[in-house]
Image (cartoon, rainbow, N blue to C red):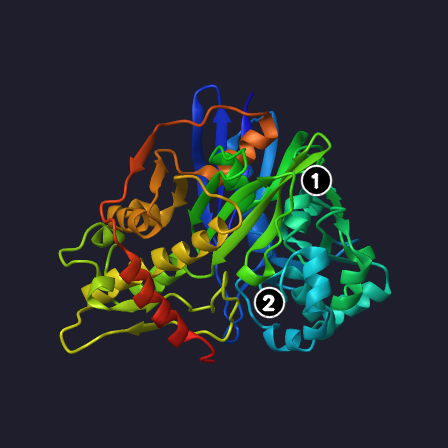
Protein backbone atom coordinates (compact mmCIF):
# COMPACT_ATOMS: atom_id res chain seq x y z
CA UNK A 1 0.00 0.00 0.00
CA UNK A 2 1.36 3.42 -0.96
CA UNK A 3 0.35 6.34 1.27
CA UNK A 4 1.05 10.03 0.70
CA UNK A 5 1.01 12.04 3.92
CA UNK A 6 0.94 15.83 3.63
CA UNK A 7 2.50 17.80 6.49
CA UNK A 8 1.29 21.34 5.90
CA UNK A 9 3.24 23.31 8.49
CA UNK A 10 3.98 26.86 9.53
CA UNK A 11 6.93 27.37 7.21
CA UNK A 12 6.66 24.61 4.60
CA UNK A 13 4.54 21.90 3.03
CA UNK A 14 6.05 18.43 2.84
CA UNK A 15 4.89 15.07 1.54
CA UNK A 16 6.01 11.74 2.88
CA UNK A 17 5.62 8.63 0.75
CA UNK A 18 5.14 5.43 2.75
CA UNK A 19 5.32 2.13 0.87
CA UNK A 20 6.88 -1.31 1.10
CA UNK A 21 10.35 0.18 0.69
CA UNK A 22 10.00 2.50 3.67
CA UNK A 23 9.16 6.14 4.32
CA UNK A 24 10.75 9.18 2.75
CA UNK A 25 10.06 12.84 2.06
CA UNK A 26 9.72 13.29 -1.70
CA UNK A 27 8.98 17.02 -1.85
CA UNK A 28 9.20 20.00 0.50
CA UNK A 29 8.10 23.50 -0.50
CA UNK A 30 8.51 26.65 1.60
CA UNK A 31 5.95 29.43 1.60
CA UNK A 32 6.05 33.12 2.44
CA UNK A 33 5.37 34.56 5.88
CA UNK A 34 3.60 37.93 5.95
CA UNK A 35 3.80 40.34 8.90
CA UNK A 36 1.57 43.28 7.91
CA UNK A 37 1.65 44.72 11.45
CA UNK A 38 3.61 43.94 14.62
CA UNK A 39 2.28 40.72 16.12
CA UNK A 40 0.40 39.76 12.95
CA UNK A 41 1.38 36.61 11.03
CA UNK A 42 -0.36 35.58 7.80
CA UNK A 43 -0.09 33.11 4.94
CA UNK A 44 -1.53 33.25 1.43
CA UNK A 45 -4.25 30.54 1.24
CA UNK A 46 -3.78 30.03 -2.50
CA UNK A 47 -0.02 29.61 -2.10
CA UNK A 48 -0.56 26.93 0.55
CA UNK A 49 -3.09 25.17 -1.69
CA UNK A 50 -0.69 25.24 -4.66
CA UNK A 51 2.03 23.72 -2.50
CA UNK A 52 -0.27 20.93 -1.29
CA UNK A 53 -1.13 20.14 -4.90
CA UNK A 54 2.54 20.18 -5.89
CA UNK A 55 3.45 17.80 -3.09
CA UNK A 56 0.65 15.38 -3.96
CA UNK A 57 1.76 15.38 -7.58
CA UNK A 58 5.33 14.64 -6.50
CA UNK A 59 4.15 11.57 -4.57
CA UNK A 60 2.86 9.94 -7.76
CA UNK A 61 0.28 7.18 -7.73
CA UNK A 62 -0.84 6.28 -4.22
CA UNK A 63 -3.62 4.29 -2.56
CA UNK A 64 -4.46 6.68 0.26
CA UNK A 65 -3.78 10.23 1.45
CA UNK A 66 -3.34 11.65 4.93
CA UNK A 67 -3.34 15.34 5.84
CA UNK A 68 -1.65 16.92 8.86
CA UNK A 69 -2.31 20.62 9.38
CA UNK A 70 -0.71 23.47 11.32
CA UNK A 71 -3.44 23.60 13.93
CA UNK A 72 -5.04 26.85 14.98
CA UNK A 73 -4.30 28.74 11.75
CA UNK A 74 -7.57 29.60 10.04
CA UNK A 75 -9.39 31.59 7.37
CA UNK A 76 -12.71 32.38 5.69
CA UNK A 77 -13.80 31.46 2.18
CA UNK A 78 -16.82 31.44 -0.10
CA UNK A 79 -18.82 28.21 -0.11
CA UNK A 80 -19.81 28.58 -3.77
CA UNK A 81 -16.64 29.83 -5.45
CA UNK A 82 -14.11 28.44 -2.95
CA UNK A 83 -12.38 31.84 -3.08
CA UNK A 84 -10.57 32.81 0.12
CA UNK A 85 -12.10 35.86 1.80
CA UNK A 86 -9.25 36.36 4.24
CA UNK A 87 -5.60 35.50 4.58
CA UNK A 88 -4.68 32.52 6.70
CA UNK A 89 -4.29 33.99 10.17
CA UNK A 90 -1.48 31.91 11.65
CA UNK A 91 -1.52 30.38 15.13
CA UNK A 92 1.33 32.71 16.20
CA UNK A 93 -0.74 35.80 15.37
CA UNK A 94 -1.77 37.88 18.40
CA UNK A 95 -3.96 40.58 16.81
CA UNK A 96 -6.94 39.59 18.96
CA UNK A 97 -5.19 39.81 22.35
CA UNK A 98 -6.70 43.17 23.30
CA UNK A 99 -10.18 42.18 22.12
CA UNK A 100 -10.05 39.04 24.25
CA UNK A 101 -9.64 41.15 27.39
CA UNK A 102 -13.28 42.04 27.00
CA UNK A 103 -14.28 38.37 27.36
CA UNK A 104 -12.56 37.76 30.71
CA UNK A 105 -15.91 37.21 32.43
CA UNK A 106 -16.41 34.20 30.11
CA UNK A 107 -13.02 32.64 30.94
CA UNK A 108 -14.41 30.03 33.32
CA UNK A 109 -17.11 28.88 30.91
CA UNK A 110 -14.68 28.65 27.99
CA UNK A 111 -12.27 26.60 30.12
CA UNK A 112 -15.06 24.31 31.29
CA UNK A 113 -16.39 23.64 27.80
CA UNK A 114 -13.36 23.86 25.51
CA UNK A 115 -10.58 23.26 28.03
CA UNK A 116 -8.66 26.22 26.61
CA UNK A 117 -7.79 29.65 28.01
CA UNK A 118 -8.73 32.92 26.35
CA UNK A 119 -5.73 33.41 24.12
CA UNK A 120 -5.14 34.75 20.61
CA UNK A 121 -3.37 31.46 19.85
CA UNK A 122 -6.65 29.65 19.26
CA UNK A 123 -8.92 29.97 16.24
CA UNK A 124 -12.15 31.31 17.76
CA UNK A 125 -11.03 34.89 18.27
CA UNK A 126 -9.44 34.89 14.80
CA UNK A 127 -12.80 33.91 13.27
CA UNK A 128 -14.43 36.72 15.22
CA UNK A 129 -11.84 39.21 13.92
CA UNK A 130 -12.51 38.11 10.35
CA UNK A 131 -16.22 38.78 10.78
CA UNK A 132 -15.63 42.18 12.38
CA UNK A 133 -12.95 43.42 10.02
CA UNK A 134 -13.55 41.87 6.59
CA UNK A 135 -16.70 43.12 4.83
CA UNK A 136 -16.57 40.29 2.26
CA UNK A 137 -16.88 37.75 5.05
CA UNK A 138 -19.91 39.51 6.49
CA UNK A 139 -21.50 39.67 3.05
CA UNK A 140 -20.91 35.96 2.52
CA UNK A 141 -22.50 35.24 5.89
CA UNK A 142 -25.57 37.29 4.98
CA UNK A 143 -25.81 35.39 1.68
CA UNK A 144 -25.47 32.00 3.40
CA UNK A 145 -22.15 31.37 1.63
CA UNK A 146 -19.61 31.85 4.42
CA UNK A 147 -17.24 29.08 5.43
CA UNK A 148 -14.94 29.43 8.42
CA UNK A 149 -12.34 26.80 9.14
CA UNK A 150 -8.83 25.81 9.92
CA UNK A 151 -6.55 25.23 6.95
CA UNK A 152 -7.34 21.51 6.72
CA UNK A 153 -11.03 22.26 6.11
CA UNK A 154 -10.08 24.71 3.34
CA UNK A 155 -7.82 22.16 1.63
CA UNK A 156 -10.38 19.37 1.92
CA UNK A 157 -13.18 21.58 0.61
CA UNK A 158 -11.18 22.78 -2.39
CA UNK A 159 -9.44 19.49 -3.22
CA UNK A 160 -11.90 16.80 -2.13
CA UNK A 161 -15.22 18.64 -2.06
CA UNK A 162 -15.68 17.77 1.61
CA UNK A 163 -16.28 20.54 4.14
CA UNK A 164 -14.96 18.81 7.23
CA UNK A 165 -12.30 18.92 9.89
CA UNK A 166 -11.18 16.31 12.39
CA UNK A 167 -11.74 16.22 16.11
CA UNK A 168 -8.11 16.97 17.04
CA UNK A 169 -8.07 20.14 14.98
CA UNK A 170 -11.50 21.19 16.19
CA UNK A 171 -10.29 20.78 19.76
CA UNK A 172 -7.80 23.62 19.10
CA UNK A 173 -10.37 26.22 18.09
CA UNK A 174 -12.00 27.02 21.49
CA UNK A 175 -15.36 26.24 19.84
CA UNK A 176 -15.56 22.47 20.38
CA UNK A 177 -16.91 20.91 23.55
CA UNK A 178 -14.22 18.49 24.76
CA UNK A 179 -16.71 16.02 26.15
CA UNK A 180 -19.23 15.88 23.29
CA UNK A 181 -16.51 16.46 20.64
CA UNK A 182 -18.96 18.64 18.71
CA UNK A 183 -19.30 22.38 18.15
CA UNK A 184 -20.69 24.04 21.26
CA UNK A 185 -23.50 26.58 20.85
CA UNK A 186 -22.53 28.48 24.00
CA UNK A 187 -18.92 28.83 22.89
CA UNK A 188 -20.00 30.03 19.46
CA UNK A 189 -22.19 32.68 21.11
CA UNK A 190 -19.35 33.85 23.35
CA UNK A 191 -17.01 34.40 20.42
CA UNK A 192 -19.69 35.54 17.98
CA UNK A 193 -19.00 32.75 15.51
CA UNK A 194 -21.94 31.38 13.46
CA UNK A 195 -22.01 27.63 13.96
CA UNK A 196 -23.58 27.09 10.54
CA UNK A 197 -20.38 28.40 8.91
CA UNK A 198 -18.19 25.76 10.60
CA UNK A 199 -17.20 22.40 9.05
CA UNK A 200 -18.44 18.99 10.12
CA UNK A 201 -16.28 17.34 12.79
CA UNK A 202 -15.13 13.81 11.94
CA UNK A 203 -12.86 11.20 13.50
CA UNK A 204 -9.13 11.46 12.74
CA UNK A 205 -9.14 8.23 10.74
CA UNK A 206 -11.99 7.72 8.31
CA UNK A 207 -13.52 9.17 5.17
CA UNK A 208 -12.53 12.68 4.07
CA UNK A 209 -13.48 12.31 0.42
CA UNK A 210 -11.17 11.78 -2.54
CA UNK A 211 -8.49 13.85 -4.24
CA UNK A 212 -8.01 12.81 -7.83
CA UNK A 213 -9.80 9.54 -7.14
CA UNK A 214 -7.56 8.71 -4.16
CA UNK A 215 -9.31 8.44 -0.76
CA UNK A 216 -8.25 10.76 2.05
CA UNK A 217 -8.13 8.38 5.03
CA UNK A 218 -6.78 10.57 7.82
CA UNK A 219 -6.71 14.20 8.86
CA UNK A 220 -5.36 15.55 12.14
CA UNK A 221 -3.47 18.41 13.67
CA UNK A 222 0.31 18.27 13.35
CA UNK A 223 1.25 17.83 17.01
CA UNK A 224 -1.18 14.96 17.50
CA UNK A 225 0.12 13.38 14.31
CA UNK A 226 3.64 13.62 15.74
CA UNK A 227 2.45 12.09 19.04
CA UNK A 228 1.12 9.13 17.08
CA UNK A 229 4.25 8.97 14.96
CA UNK A 230 6.44 8.77 18.06
CA UNK A 231 4.58 5.62 19.09
CA UNK A 232 2.98 7.19 22.16
CA UNK A 233 -0.04 5.08 23.01
CA UNK A 234 -0.38 4.62 26.80
CA UNK A 235 -0.95 7.07 29.63
CA UNK A 236 2.24 8.98 30.44
CA UNK A 237 3.87 8.48 27.03
CA UNK A 238 5.17 11.89 25.95
CA UNK A 239 6.86 13.56 23.02
CA UNK A 240 8.24 17.01 22.30
CA UNK A 241 8.40 18.45 18.78
CA UNK A 242 10.78 21.35 18.22
CA UNK A 243 9.54 23.20 15.18
CA UNK A 244 8.61 26.86 14.92
CA UNK A 245 7.49 26.45 18.53
CA UNK A 246 8.11 23.60 20.96
CA UNK A 247 5.12 21.41 21.71
CA UNK A 248 4.97 18.74 24.39
CA UNK A 249 2.08 16.28 24.51
CA UNK A 250 1.42 13.41 26.88
CA UNK A 251 -1.25 10.75 26.46
CA UNK A 252 -3.96 10.71 29.14
CA UNK A 253 -6.11 7.95 27.60
CA UNK A 254 -9.88 8.11 28.01
CA UNK A 255 -9.62 10.76 30.71
CA UNK A 256 -9.72 14.51 30.18
CA UNK A 257 -7.08 16.09 32.42
CA UNK A 258 -8.03 19.66 33.27
CA UNK A 259 -5.39 21.84 34.87
CA UNK A 260 -6.16 25.54 34.35
CA UNK A 261 -4.04 26.52 37.33
CA UNK A 262 -0.97 24.89 35.80
CA UNK A 263 -1.46 26.35 32.35
CA UNK A 264 -1.81 22.93 30.71
CA UNK A 265 -4.38 22.24 28.04
CA UNK A 266 -6.51 19.13 27.63
CA UNK A 267 -6.90 18.15 24.01
CA UNK A 268 -8.02 15.24 21.85
CA UNK A 269 -5.09 13.02 20.86
CA UNK A 270 -7.04 11.19 18.13
CA UNK A 271 -10.37 9.51 17.48
CA UNK A 272 -11.03 6.39 15.44
CA UNK A 273 -13.43 3.45 15.41
CA UNK A 274 -15.89 5.31 17.62
CA UNK A 275 -13.50 6.01 20.51
CA UNK A 276 -11.24 8.92 21.42
CA UNK A 277 -8.00 9.22 23.33
CA UNK A 278 -7.08 12.46 25.03
CA UNK A 279 -3.80 14.17 25.78
CA UNK A 280 -2.47 17.09 27.78
CA UNK A 281 -0.60 19.75 25.87
CA UNK A 282 1.92 22.41 26.75
CA UNK A 283 3.66 24.73 24.33
CA UNK A 284 6.54 27.16 23.95
CA UNK A 285 5.66 29.74 21.31
CA UNK A 286 9.19 30.35 20.07
CA UNK A 287 11.73 27.57 19.49
CA UNK A 288 12.94 27.25 15.90
CA UNK A 289 11.62 30.74 15.23
CA UNK A 290 13.86 32.08 18.01
CA UNK A 291 16.87 30.31 16.50
CA UNK A 292 16.11 31.75 13.05
CA UNK A 293 15.80 35.19 14.64
CA UNK A 294 19.17 34.72 16.32
CA UNK A 295 20.70 33.87 12.98
CA UNK A 296 19.21 37.01 11.41
CA UNK A 297 20.79 39.00 14.24
CA UNK A 298 24.16 37.55 13.25
CA UNK A 299 24.75 35.39 16.33
CA UNK A 300 25.79 32.54 14.04
CA UNK A 301 26.00 31.88 10.32
CA UNK A 302 25.10 28.19 9.97
CA UNK A 303 23.12 25.82 12.18
CA UNK A 304 26.03 23.40 12.56
CA UNK A 305 27.76 26.08 14.65
CA UNK A 306 25.22 25.22 17.37
CA UNK A 307 26.32 21.59 17.62
CA UNK A 308 28.86 22.26 20.36
CA UNK A 309 30.23 25.06 22.54
CA UNK A 310 33.63 25.39 24.16
CA UNK A 311 32.40 27.29 27.23
CA UNK A 312 30.43 25.74 30.10
CA UNK A 313 26.64 26.22 29.95
CA UNK A 314 25.68 29.87 29.84
CA UNK A 315 23.11 29.35 32.58
CA UNK A 316 25.89 28.31 34.99
CA UNK A 317 27.42 31.73 34.29
CA UNK A 318 24.04 33.35 35.05
CA UNK A 319 23.56 34.30 31.42
CA UNK A 320 19.97 33.46 30.46
CA UNK A 321 17.73 33.98 27.47
CA UNK A 322 13.93 33.87 27.70
CA UNK A 323 12.43 32.93 24.26
CA UNK A 324 9.30 35.07 24.56
CA UNK A 325 9.29 36.73 21.14
CA UNK A 326 5.57 35.93 20.93
CA UNK A 327 4.99 35.93 24.69
CA UNK A 328 4.93 33.00 27.08
CA UNK A 329 2.59 30.03 26.68
CA UNK A 330 2.35 27.16 29.21
CA UNK A 331 2.45 27.45 32.19
CA UNK A 332 2.42 31.28 32.22
CA UNK A 333 0.04 32.28 29.38
CA UNK A 334 1.41 35.82 29.29
CA UNK A 335 1.27 37.49 25.88
CA UNK A 336 2.71 40.64 27.44
CA UNK A 337 6.02 38.91 28.21
CA UNK A 338 8.98 39.90 26.06
CA UNK A 339 12.12 38.08 24.98
CA UNK A 340 15.27 39.06 26.85
CA UNK A 341 18.84 38.18 27.61
CA UNK A 342 19.91 38.85 31.19
CA UNK A 343 23.32 38.50 32.77
CA UNK A 344 25.46 40.02 30.02
CA UNK A 345 28.63 41.98 30.72
CA UNK A 346 31.46 43.47 28.66
CA UNK A 347 32.97 40.03 28.05
CA UNK A 348 29.78 38.48 26.64
CA UNK A 349 30.17 37.35 23.04
CA UNK A 350 27.78 36.49 20.24
CA UNK A 351 28.75 32.86 20.86
CA UNK A 352 27.64 33.16 24.49
CA UNK A 353 24.33 34.67 23.43
CA UNK A 354 23.70 31.89 20.91
CA UNK A 355 24.45 29.30 23.60
CA UNK A 356 22.04 31.00 26.03
CA UNK A 357 19.39 31.12 23.31
CA UNK A 358 19.48 27.34 22.87
CA UNK A 359 19.48 26.77 26.61
CA UNK A 360 16.51 29.10 27.08
CA UNK A 361 14.39 27.04 24.71
CA UNK A 362 15.32 23.86 26.60
CA UNK A 363 14.65 25.44 30.00
CA UNK A 364 11.25 26.77 28.87
CA UNK A 365 10.46 23.27 27.66
CA UNK A 366 11.47 21.90 31.06
CA UNK A 367 8.94 24.27 32.69
CA UNK A 368 6.23 22.71 30.52
CA UNK A 369 7.25 19.11 31.29
CA UNK A 370 7.41 19.84 35.03
CA UNK A 371 3.85 21.18 34.92
CA UNK A 372 2.73 18.05 33.05
CA UNK A 373 4.46 15.67 35.42
CA UNK A 374 2.61 17.20 38.37
CA UNK A 375 -0.65 15.93 36.83
CA UNK A 376 0.23 12.94 34.66
CA UNK A 377 3.29 10.94 35.70
CA UNK A 378 5.65 11.28 32.75
CA UNK A 379 7.98 8.34 32.13
CA UNK A 380 11.75 8.44 32.49
CA UNK A 381 12.07 8.71 28.70
CA UNK A 382 10.74 11.41 26.39
CA UNK A 383 10.86 11.12 22.61
CA UNK A 384 11.78 14.26 20.66
CA UNK A 385 11.92 15.42 17.06
CA UNK A 386 12.28 18.58 15.01
CA UNK A 387 15.02 20.73 13.62
CA UNK A 388 16.58 21.75 16.95
CA UNK A 389 17.23 18.12 17.83
CA UNK A 390 19.96 18.10 15.17
CA UNK A 391 22.09 20.07 17.64
CA UNK A 392 23.93 17.61 19.88
CA UNK A 393 24.48 20.39 22.43
CA UNK A 394 20.77 21.18 22.59
CA UNK A 395 19.71 17.55 23.06
CA UNK A 396 22.28 16.92 25.81
CA UNK A 397 21.34 20.15 27.60
CA UNK A 398 17.65 19.20 27.32
CA UNK A 399 18.34 15.77 28.87
CA UNK A 400 20.08 17.52 31.76
CA UNK A 401 17.37 20.14 32.18
CA UNK A 402 14.64 17.47 32.21
CA UNK A 403 16.70 14.88 34.12
CA UNK A 404 15.30 12.29 31.76
CA UNK A 405 16.59 10.12 28.97
CA UNK A 406 15.91 11.69 25.59
CA UNK A 407 14.96 9.35 22.76
CA UNK A 408 16.05 10.68 19.40
CA UNK A 409 14.56 8.69 16.49
CA UNK A 410 16.83 8.41 13.46
CA UNK A 411 13.81 9.01 11.25
CA UNK A 412 12.52 12.40 12.33
CA UNK A 413 9.67 13.19 9.94
CA UNK A 414 7.26 12.00 12.59
CA UNK A 415 4.39 14.38 11.94
CA UNK A 416 4.07 13.10 8.38
CA UNK A 417 4.79 9.51 9.45
CA UNK A 418 2.12 9.64 12.18
CA UNK A 419 -0.38 10.93 9.66
CA UNK A 420 0.54 8.15 7.22
CA UNK A 421 0.26 5.53 9.96
CA UNK A 422 -3.17 6.88 10.94
CA UNK A 423 -4.27 6.67 7.29
CA UNK A 424 -2.92 3.19 6.62
CA UNK A 425 -2.97 1.41 9.96
CA UNK A 426 -0.08 0.99 12.36
CA UNK A 427 3.19 0.31 10.58
CA UNK A 428 6.69 0.08 12.08
CA UNK A 429 8.56 3.35 12.28
CA UNK A 430 11.69 3.23 10.11
CA UNK A 431 15.15 3.61 11.64
CA UNK A 432 16.56 3.16 15.10
CA UNK A 433 16.54 5.37 18.20
CA UNK A 434 19.46 7.12 19.90
CA UNK A 435 19.20 7.50 23.68
CA UNK A 436 20.80 10.56 25.30
CA UNK A 437 21.15 10.35 29.08
CA UNK A 438 21.74 13.22 31.53
CA UNK A 439 25.40 13.87 32.33
CA UNK A 440 24.78 16.58 34.96
CA UNK A 441 22.88 15.57 38.09
CA UNK A 442 22.30 18.83 39.95
CA UNK A 443 20.45 21.37 37.84
CA UNK A 444 18.31 23.03 40.50
CA UNK A 445 20.43 26.17 40.21
CA UNK A 446 19.77 26.32 36.46
CA UNK A 447 16.02 26.41 37.02
CA UNK A 448 16.32 28.99 39.79
CA UNK A 449 18.31 31.39 37.60
CA UNK A 450 16.04 30.82 34.63
CA UNK A 451 12.87 31.23 36.69
CA UNK A 452 14.15 34.60 37.83
CA UNK A 453 14.78 35.60 34.21
CA UNK A 454 11.26 34.52 33.20
CA UNK A 455 9.74 36.65 35.94
CA UNK A 456 11.69 39.65 34.67
CA UNK A 457 10.33 39.09 31.15
CA UNK A 458 6.68 39.09 32.18
CA UNK A 459 4.20 41.96 31.80
CA UNK A 460 6.76 43.88 29.75
CA UNK A 461 4.62 44.92 26.80
The answer to whether residue 9 is left or right of residue 101 is left
Could you say which is closer to the camera, residue 372 or residue 460? 372
Does the image show residue 95? yes
Image coords of residue 145 (percent x, y): 82, 58
Please tell me which residue is depicted at 37% across the width and 67% down the height of the picture.
451
Q: Secondary structure at mark 1?
A: helix
Image coords of residue 164 (percent x, y): 73, 45
Q: Is residue 279 above or below residue 260?
A: above
The answer to whether residue 302 is left or right of residue 172 is left
Quadrant hosting residue 425: top right
Q: Secondary structure at mark 2?
A: loop
Q: Is residue 155 above or below residue 60?
A: below
Instruction: Name, please, the residue furthest toward the right.
Output: 143
**Pointer 1 residue:** 160
Quadrant hosting residue 207: top right
Q: The N terminus appears in which quarter of the rendering?
A: top right
Marking on residue 220: none
The answer to whether residue 450 is left or right of residue 173 is left
Could you say which is closer to the camera, residue 219 or residue 115? 115
Q: Nearer the viewer, mark 2 or mark 1?
A: 2
Please tell me which residue is depicted at 63% across the width and 59% down the height of the picture.
116
**Pointer 2 residue:** 120
Could you say which is closer to the camera, residue 274 or residue 266? 266
Please tell me which residue is depicted at 47% across the width and 69% down the height of the picture.
327
As measured in the structure, the alpha-carbon distance from the residue carrying label 2 to the one carrying label 1 is: 30 Å
Amino acid sequence: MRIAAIDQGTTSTRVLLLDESGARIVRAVKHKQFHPQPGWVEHDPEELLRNVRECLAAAGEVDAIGLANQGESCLAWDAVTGHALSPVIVWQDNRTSTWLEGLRDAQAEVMARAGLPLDAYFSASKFSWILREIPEARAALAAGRLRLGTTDAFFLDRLAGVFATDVTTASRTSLMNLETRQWDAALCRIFGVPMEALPEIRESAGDFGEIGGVPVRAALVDQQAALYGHGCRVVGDAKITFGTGAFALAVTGAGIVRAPGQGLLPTVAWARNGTADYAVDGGVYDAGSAVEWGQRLGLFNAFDELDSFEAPPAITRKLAFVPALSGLACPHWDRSAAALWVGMDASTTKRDMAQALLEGIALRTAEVVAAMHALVPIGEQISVDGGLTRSAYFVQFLANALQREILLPEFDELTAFGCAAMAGGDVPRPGGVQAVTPDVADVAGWHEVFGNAVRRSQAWR
